[in-house]
Amino acid sequence: MKLSIRHEHEYRAMLWKNGKGLTREVWVYPEGATLDDCLWRVSCAQVAQAGAFSQMLGLERSLMILRGVLRVQDLDAQRSVFLSPQSAPFVFAGSAAIHAEPMGAGRVEDFNVMTRTGDCSHVARRLNVVGTHDEPLMGDWMLIYHEGGAPVHIDQSTELVLDERATLLVAREGKGGEIIRLSATQASLIVVHINQIRRMP
């Protein structure tokens, strides 16, 4: 398996299509791809004001809150939820009509995962590491985002260390069964497993 770490200052900043927020692209695959031709993308965003999410046809999305509270309305499914850092991932189709509104005076920051429908699938969850945790690679890629806390040592290495707001990308190279050992006094992480369903020709 191949391991890479990207730090916050390396994330690519871009304005939303509707101009109402700022996205920092954590990772995209293939490298250099756009939302029109990527297999998957992981990003963080700041929601500055209420408004509709840009529709992204052909993508499945998961949204998690890093800071603040966001009211999210799925107008197609007629559901409304309040999302906070304690909430489960909000999963929706990129084609859905979504309206979001930051609540309160503080800023809202979120964490987004997008995968190409029919080509890839993903699962995202939060993980609190106290001591040591073994995380199996369950797909073709795994991303671990450091949400806060102490530095995380990867496979007990003194050189491969994940600091706050950095992201580890693990890419499968063999038949699977790989395990990543995470060690920290205490760290809050987001773990994303991505599996490629349909192989590129």
Image: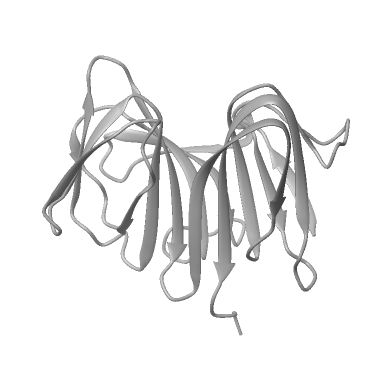
Depth check, front residue: 72 or 14:
72
Tell me which residue sits at (56%, 61%) in the image: 194
- Expressed as whole percent of the image width and height from the top left, the position of residue 143 reads 62, 49
Tell me which residue sits at (76%, 49%) in the image: 180
Depth check, front residue: 10 or 4:
4
| Number of on-image labels | 0
**Quarter location, residue 114:** bottom left
- Expressed as whole percent of the image width and height from the top left, the position of residue 199 reads 59, 80
Depth check, front residue: 134 or 31:
134
Left or right: 145 as drawn, with respect to 17: right
The quadrant of the picture occupied by the C terminus is: bottom right
Left or right: 158 as drawn, with respect to 47: right
Left or right: 105 as drawn, with respect to 65: left
The quadrant of the picture occupied by the N terminus is: bottom right
- Expressed as whole percent of the image width and height from the top left, the position of residue 165 reads 59, 29
What's the colour scheme? one colour
Q: Is residue 3 above or below residue 13?
A: below
Tell me which residue sits at (75%, 46%) in the image: 4
Q: Is residue 38 visible?
A: no
Q: Is residue 21 above or below residue 177?
A: above
Q: Is residue 1 visible?
A: yes
Depth check, front residue: 57 or 83:
83
**Quarter location, residue 166:** top right
Residue furthest toward the bottom?
A: 201
Residue furthest toward the right?
A: 158
- Expressed as whole percent of the image width and height from the top left, the position of residue 100 reads 21, 39
